[in-house]
Amino acid sequence: AAKLSPEKLLCQLRDRVNVTMIRGSDGPFDTSEWQQYLPEKILNETVGSLGRCAVVSSAGSLKSSHLGQEIDSHDAILRFNGAPTKGFQEDVGQKTTIRLVNSQLVTVEKEQFLKDALYNTGILIVWDPAPYHAEIHEWYRKPDYNFFESYKSYRSKHPEQPFYILNPKMQWQLWDVLQENSLEHIQPNPPSSGMLGIVIMMTLCDEVDVYEFLPSKRQTDICHYYQKFHDRACTMGAYHPLLFEKNLVKHINQGTDEDIYTRGKVTLPGFRNVHC
Ligand code: NCC
């Protein structure tokens, strides 16, 4: 597979990866029961059109980065899973506009998820690994983690907070683009929350700055900036095709190598600024 130019790759992402949230009119969710739980407004209406956005990875290399102020200067900020801001403002900022969580967290860490105030700010989006290009009914019958009950409990507890379910078709559309632009066979598992979050923000924003997805000079085996736990797989990937995701993001970076080295920062255009 010959690598596409950065411009062509951006066009592929824009035209082939369809970022949508589950709606009450979609397949198995078109029941009166589900209508009470799914948000009425679509995500675009909830957030409006965003200018400069930041995606903050959870990497250990954010520690001692002093990037907090720079991150907070963005119009909207996306964070992942249980990544906190409290106590870490200096390095990661304090604003959260969107939090993307995986279905494992919502299910396995259900008690925490339902009670921890960390999750009560901004818009929540949950995603679940679906079988390769599975039809939405098939996925609904056999999700990777059955997070639906936990989702409903959260919605009942916090009915005013927008909380979306990512349409699972997106993950494999994105995986196909990753595979087609990699020289090796990549593992048949969906992209990481990090990569999904980057593409979600590219659909909502004029410009997206991503922090410590491509590691800076602070690269470390410490998995998260908020925990002491060491594991190289956090940065390189094991289940998720993280290395391939990072190669692709590097290829379409519009910022400088210096920004990667010192700030772990890449700058990507929003899809509305990609002209094909
Ligand atoms: O660790 P996790 O990811 O929550 O991190 C969010 C995203 O940040 C990027 N990252 C993280 C650490 C690191 N050293 N380098 C990075 O680049 C990645 O892009 C990552 O996606 C996930 O993707 O959802 C993941 O979730 C965790 C875990 O489920 C949640 O933190 C909830 O507890 C997974 N860890 C385990 O299952 C043990 C992780 O594999 C993927």
Image (spheres, grey):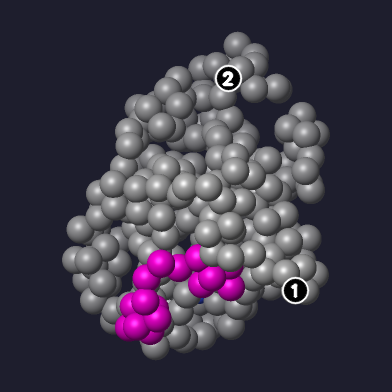
In the rendered image, the residue lying farthest to the front is 276
Q: Mark 1 touching mark 2, by CB under 8 A?
A: no
Left or right, residue 203 beside residue 90 = right
> Ligand 1, what quadrant?
bottom right
Residue 115 in view of the camera: no
**Is residue 214 shown in magenta?**
no
Is the CB atom of the residue marked by disc 2 within 8 angstroms of ligand 1's nearest atom?
no
Q: Could you say whether the residue bearing mark 1 is in a helix, strand or loop? A: loop
| Residue type, mark 1 in image | Leu
Of residue 170 and residue 4, the one placed in the foreground of this image is 4
Of residue 241 and residue 99, the one placed in the foreground of this image is 241
Q: Could you say whether the residue bearing mark 2 is in a helix, strand or loop? A: loop
Magenta stretch, overall SS:
helix
Identify the residue at image location x=58%, y=30%. Answer: 22
Q: Compared to 262, does 79 lie above or below?
A: above
In the rendered image, the residue lying farthest to the top is 32
Which quadrant: the N terminus? bottom right
Identify the residue at image location x=78%, y=34%. Answer: 135
Identify the residue at image location x=51%, y=17%. Answer: 36
Q: Which residues are magenta?
A: 247-262
Q: Disc number at residue 183?
A: 1
Q: Disc number at residue 24?
A: 2
Identify the image quadrant of residue 258. Answer: bottom left
> Badge 1: how crowded within 10 Å, few (<14), some, or many (20+)?
few
**Is residue 249 shown in magenta?**
yes
Of residue 145 and residue 173, the one placed in the foreground of this image is 173
Left or right, residue 145 beside residue 188 = left
Q: Compared to 80, does 28 lie above or below?
A: above
Please report whichever mark, 1 or 2, sits nearer to the chain's N-terminal start: 2
| Residue type, mark 2 in image | Gly
